[in-house]
Amino acid sequence: MKIACLSGKGGAGKTFVAVNLAAAAEHCTYIDCDVEEPNGRLFLKPEKIQSDVVSTTLPQFDAAKCNGCKQCVAFCKFHALVYIKDKPMLFPEMCHHCGGCALVCQMGAVSERENPIGMLERGQHKGIRVVTGVLDAGGISGVPIIKKALETASGTTILDCPPGSACAVMETVMDVDYCVLVAEATAFGFHDVKMVYELITLLGKPCGMVINKETEPYLPLERFCDEKKIPILARIPYQPSLATYLADGEIVAELLPHEQARFATILQKIGGDV
Amino acid sequence: MRIAIPLDENKQDVCLVLARAPFFLFWEDGVASVIENPAANAQGGAGAQVAQFLVDREVNVLITPRLGQNAADVFAVAGIKIYKSTEKAAVEQVADYQNGTLAVLTKFHGGFHGIR
């Protein structure tokens, strides 16, 4: 069973919920798909790390074979190619490495080269397999790394999503069985969680809400959950002590019995293995 | 000598952007023509697309208020000279270029790559 934690807004508590759900599950796979800023590893501190480079491909052009027909330029819907002088010029950051330019070339002038964009780290924290996707600084898209990371899913798998509701999030939740929406009880938190709710509804995913850092119920969020019949899996009150544990990189579900119970209850409500 | 200038909807003023300008003014041997920009409505990569358009049209000189880095890279390879436009109407820029009063454009922006 694959469970994704997502929130739209950054800093709502995706990683907090995902890491602690993994700790409560004890034997599971945790995949950090927030490849621009993977921070689950700060809590899980995985050991025996094995790192693999993740690459995409970029086209390269042989001027000696190119006859200047510009079929490749016409084919590229991302406009990553401009034909100039005696061969196409590539704008790598616009290339979506679809391979189409090589397919349409009648002269065999297009070949592909490896283009490293990041890493996939695999390690272990107690019974949890910890997989972390890491996009190189300045990288344009982490989607190829997320795809590679998702291949490692097995058994109960907790996915820590990127923030927002764009391509990277969509890629992460595409194949999940359940979505845990983490919402701050604020106007900003509510606004963004509605966006991810819309996304996962389009994809037909069941979901439940974890309301995090709650000082008092935020009525528009309450009404929304009520209206859409979204089960509230947990309400985590704002507590400075919890923030202190987090700042120290601690996993509260491993330290505090009542927190262990809280996250185990969420898993039971979802129907995952505990 | 062929000169290109991005044009606004009114086909007289210089357009503030290059890649998504609705029209171009082409000037060659005293003859002006106004042509639609095929990159104006591109979903993304308009800079690269307009660069290909201007290279294919064998432009020698481009007069524009601003220019993205991607297009600038193409024009550098193609040997197209870039000058910075002023606030005058487009046809007057041609005269200014011929009198040698236009400045060479040397600063390019990073491009938006679909991000607005």
Image: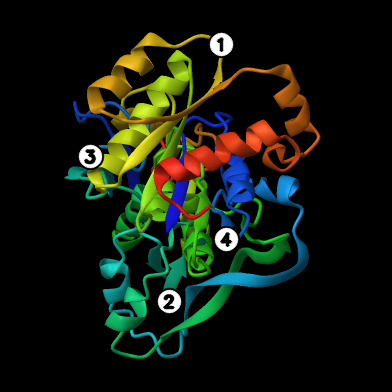
Q: Position of residue A171 (x, y in %)?
A: 40, 55
Q: Which residue is mark 4?
A: A29
Above or below, comparing residue A258 to residue A50 in the picture: above
- What residue type is disc 2 on? Lys
Camera-side mark, 3 or 4: 4
The residue shown at (67%, 65%) is A121
Classed neighbour count for the residue bearing mark 2: other residues with Cα under 10 Å, few (<14), some (14–19), many (≥20): many
Does residue A171 appear to the left or right of A18 in the view shown?
A: left
Check disc 3 and report its element: helix, strand or loop: strand
Q: CA distance from mark 1 to mark 4?
A: 32 Å
The quadrant of the rendering that contains the N terminus of chain B is: bottom left
Q: Which residue is mark 1?
A: A215
Identify the chain of the residue marked 4, using the numbered disc in the image.
A
Query: CB under 8 Å between callouts 3 and 4?
Result: no
Identify the chain of the residue marked 2, using the numbered disc in the image.
A
Numbered badge on residue A87? 2
Query: CB under 8 Å between callouts 1 and 4?
Result: no
Classed neighbour count for the residue bearing mark 1: other residues with Cα under 10 Å, few (<14), some (14–19), many (≥20): some
